[in-house]
Amino acid sequence: MRLLLIALPLALTAAPAMAQPANPPELPRELTDPAMADKVGKMAGALSRALLDLNVGEAQAAVEGRPVTEADRRRTVRDMAAGGNPDIERRIERQAAQSGVAIQAGAKAMAAALPAIMQSIGRAAAEIDRATANLPTPGYPRR
């Protein structure tokens, strides 16, 4: 009999948590669209090229506390990143192109996990409601 008294409330509280939502939430179409992933990859390539062309020699001279030379004025991130490797730009372009595919794969994984995430959030909200149900309100009279 005691087991029934303990198990019955537990069974009743677990039932709503296990229920699936009628309409599971979906990610926006833009996050799962392959065309958008291609755009993001192209944009990442353009941004990486712009970053490689950024002049940093004058800032380096200032950090080192020395006067700026003409070579410093021409030094870019590309010069510093290459470090003697002429293939650096192609490698960065390749990684930027792959970023769109990685974003699309991440969006698909998020879409697959979203129902479980929403269910967990619902359970957490219910637990918070139960935990705070017996807290006195600020206007409750003191005795």
Image (cartoon, rainbow, N blue to C red):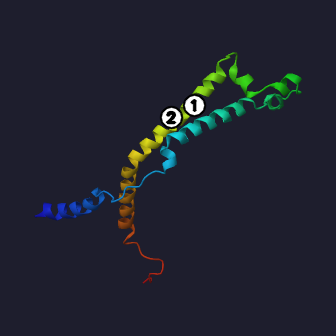
SS class, disc 2: helix
SS class, disc 1: helix
Considering every residue shown, the one lying at the far front of the view is 35
Mark 1: which amino acid? Ala
- Residue 97's label in the rendered image is 1
> Dot 2: within a 10 Å radius of its alpha carbon, few (fewer than 14), some, or many (20 or more) residues?
some
**Residue 38 point in image, percent of width and height:** 56, 37
Which quadrant is home to the N terminus? Answer: bottom left
When the figure is inspected, residue 132 is found, relative to residue 19, above or below; the finding is: below
Considering every residue shown, the one lying at the far left of the view is 1
> Dot 1: within a 10 Å radius of its alpha carbon, few (fewer than 14), some, or many (20 or more) residues?
many
Quadrant position of residue 118: bottom left
Q: Are marks 2 and 1 in contact (CB under 8 Å)?
A: yes
Give the residue drawn at x 61%, y 35%.
Answer: 42
The number of numbered badges drawn on the structure is 2
Q: Which residue is mark 2?
A: 101
Alpha carbon separation for disc pair 2 and 1 = 8 Å
Which quadrant is home to the C terminus? Answer: bottom left
Give the residue drawn at x 70%, y 18%.
Answer: 83
Quadrant position of residue 127: bottom left
